[in-house]
Amino acid sequence: MSAAFDEKVHTTLADANLQLAIYRATERLIDHRKHAVTATALPEYQELRTYANAVKRHTIDHLDHYLEEFEANVTARGGQVVYCQDATEVADFVLGLAKERGAQLIVKSKSMTTEEIDLNERLEHHNLESVETDLGEYILQLAHQRPYHIVAPALHLTRYDVGDLFARTLGVANETVVEKQTLIARAVLRQKFLAADIGISGANFLIADSGAVTIVENEGNARLTTSAPKIHIAVAGIEKLIPRAQDLAVFLKLLGRSATGQALTVYTSFLSGPRRAGEIDGPEEFYVVLLDNGRTKLLADKGKRESLYCIRCGACLNHCPVYRKIGGHSFPWVYSGPIGAIITPQFLGIEHEPSLPFASSLCGACAEVCPVKIDIPKILLELRTEVKQAEERGGTNRVERLAFKIFAWVMCHPRIYELAGLMAAGVAPSKNGKWLRKAPPAMNLAPVRAWLSQRDLPPAPAKSFRELWRKR
Amino acid sequence: MAQRVSIFVTCIVDQLFPKVGLAMADVLERLGYRVDFPEDQTCCGQPAFNTGYRREACQVARHFLKVFRDAEYVVVPSGSCTSMIAHHFHELFPDDSEMQRAAGALSPRVWEFSKFVLEVAGAEDVGARLNDVVTYHDSCHALREFGIKDGPRRLLANVRGLELREMDTAEECCGFGGTFSVKLPEISGGMARTKIDSIVRTGAKTVVSLDSSCLMQIQGALSRAALPVRTMHLAEVLASR
């Protein structure tokens, strides 16, 4: 494990308040989802998952086709599609447009894709003010932190944390009542919406047959972001495509329920093109930035490209016992939890944090709740294999590799296996069947020490099963 | 003549928890089976597979398939090892059609113990008695790869003298995860402590599960916390009289 990862894990586990905050917030989300997908509440739940998986599989397998169809339909409605390879290209496009139009202020609605490319920082670097308008994201922007969770970005902060933060950064009274905190943010953000030149949003779905962008949210800030300013830019990964508007009936049913247990979020916006003649609102210019940033690399990988089916509901985070212990900021990139553990190495390269695919007990809770049925444990296993192959090529981690070579050899030779068992039992004698708190000197190995750092070790029985069986 | 079942006791039961293997054999014999223990058995290879060492896992799987080639039924006191054999062996030989066939042929004959008792032997009541208050931990692979949920509870319900008290996190992982337990011990230990907190809240004296590996993790954490709760494999409960 890298030192940075270890350190974050350790500090998160040692912080009792943080542990409680994570546990309570995820518990609430687990509970809400559970009630939303019961056989009475949603009898067709499993069929919907199967259908959603099939639609995503089809779309990702034919992405070139649907990208062209989407672009043609956006263009026909007076919008413009901009393809960007990476973070720099997105920032360059936004900065260029802002300069041409003389824009000073940008309002943003929640978007993991823009977090992924550090868009705010890049824009602010060029003196363009970019304000997050989702309450959680706004809090994090003031705190200079990354989202802790895909859906609930400020999940780790309590209302007391927010009260302190607002008092410190906005010069208001320290207010700990959530509704009052919301009003403080609202007063600031309302002015920003009115003055903004550009609105930047993400997208939950890009609909090929209608050239529309769909955004779901609960606060109404995304609707304001995409309609109040004269220019709207939606930034989305290319995998957000679905073929037909009618498929939304399935995806919207799954997304809200999986994320927060809502049958439908408070706002669902369908945005297709700029304001047309006779319309009274909407932006004058409409752009959809389609981001690659490592995604096409995955398209080529048949075994793992289902990672691109993700609709970012966050259910796998809530249900992951590892995420619930180590939280979002222990993960090396903006995407945390099980989905982060599989897409980070694939987007950024496996060398970025090679230990990440190993930070899982492979319990499968993530796959069980995934609304599009991504087989996350299978992908973790494939990534683990890739890490070990890379280690072998690079000549690193020799001791472990040797240990597994010996393991395999022993397991293929039953007599040696029995002898090894007898020897191990000989050095770790059982004392009245009591579990061991310390390693016997001859077993003072790193994995044994790691085990004993947390739990007691079972004593070796006087006889193995096979010895007892022979005497039976 | 009694039907033959071959038992694969798993390496962890063979080396650390032999009583579990004996209990499983007892129950199977009581159900009228002739129990066979192929002596050349070792491990299913899952430790290597889950750590990313596919070549090594492949070698062990090859050995396993040779040892159990002629078995009519293979019964295993572990959901996790059963899943390795039944679900993952065939993935290990993408370029070897003969081994793939062997893995495919064995897969439907491999049974997790409780599933075998219920679905093949057709027994819900094996005549066990245990005066105890127990709680049941759903081991992840039995639950999520085989859908084993009600079965073990039905078996427990028919044990005379036994009271089952459900814990609030029965389906949450105990944190073992094979090499995960020693690669990321702090996270694994934290998960174990969450699990034992839930166990203790039930007031049960015994934790029952289908996998000795989960039970080793849970018992290790209970023992470290000096809590007077013991662990038992379902086979041990069903063998009790």
Image (tube, coloured by chain):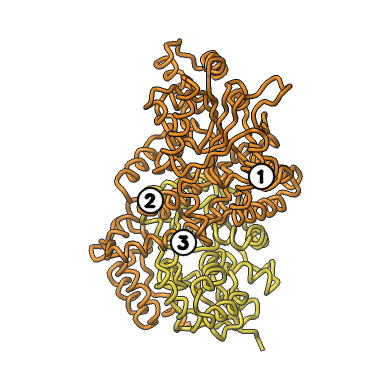
Chain colours: A orange, B yellow
Q: Nearer the viewer, mark 1 or mark 2?
A: 1
Q: Which mark is residue B224?
A: 2
On the image, the x and y values in percent for residue A414 come to 39, 82
Residue that appears at 33% across and 58% down: A436
Between disc 2 and disc 3, the foreground one is 3
Q: In the current view of this chain or complex, which residue is farthest to the left?
A: A441
Q: Is residue A317 left or right of residue A428?
A: right
Residue underneath mark 3 = A382
Closer to the chain start, of discs 1 and 3, is 1
**Which x, y percent locates residue B155?**
65, 63
Give the camera-side residue of A79 and A171.
A79
Q: Give the Cα separation between the discs numbered 1 and 2.
A: 57 Å
Q: Position of residue B37 (x, y in %)?
A: 51, 82
What is the number of the mark on residue A16? none
Q: Chain of mark 2?
A: B
Q: Answer with the quarter of the image where residue A439 lies.
A: bottom left
The local secondary structure at tag 2 comes to helix
Looking at numbered disc 1 in the image, what kind of residue is underneath it? Ala
Query: Quick one: A277 or A151, which is closer to the camera?
Result: A277
* Residue on which disc 1 sits: A208
Q: Are marks 1 and 2 in contact (CB under 8 Å)?
A: no
* Residue in view at x 48 percent, y 23 percent: A131
Is the C terminus of chain B in the top left, top right, bottom left or bottom right quadrant? bottom right
